[in-house]
Image: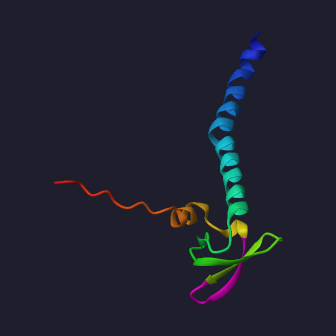
Amino acid sequence: MEQIQGFLPIILLFAVMYLFLIRPQMKKQKQEKKFAKEIKKGDKVITKSGMHGKILDLNDDGTCIIETGAGKMKFERSALSMEMSEKMNAPKTPAKKEKK
């Protein structure tokens, strides 16, 4: 019984690490893969390095061609920033006016 109690803190430490570190990271990776699969031609995107552009072509090898102000560039789909790109492509809702 004492041997089990000796290992209990170590087991709890691994459980806490899984819940607070590993599991959220796996969830974020899953969301990023889903985002990379769902992008389409014409979407406005931002790369993780901060370049803005519009998708011109999507290739089967996991790359895409983006038109920027400087020209066309080829990027890996994993180089696209999910958070910033989703904000740019979100439908715009008009501001509600208050009645006076």
Q: Residue furthest left?
A: 100
The span picked out in magenta is 68-76
Q: Position of residue 91 (x, y in %)?
A: 50, 62
Which residue corresponds to the image point at 79% horizontal and 69% vertical from the top-left? 62
* Magenta stretch: includes residue 8: no
Instruction: Tell me which corner region of the image, top left, top right, bottom left or bottom right, holds residue 58.
Output: bottom right
Q: Nearer the viewer, residue 49 or 54?
A: 54
* Magenta stretch: includes residue 74: yes
User: As displayed, is residue 21 above or below residue 68?
Assistant: above
Classify residue 3 as left or right of residue 50: right
User: As displayed, is residue 71 above or below residue 33?
Assistant: below
Q: Position of residue 52 (x, y in %)?
A: 56, 77
Which residue corresponds to the image point at 67% horizontal and 65% vertical from the top-left? 39
User: As displayed, is residue 19 above or below residue 25?
Assistant: above
Which residue corresponds to the image point at 67% horizontal and 59% vertical from the top-left? 35
Instruction: Tell me which corner region of the image, top left, top right, bottom left or bottom right, holds residue 66.
Output: bottom right
Q: Residue furthest front?
A: 99
**Color theme of the render:** rainbow
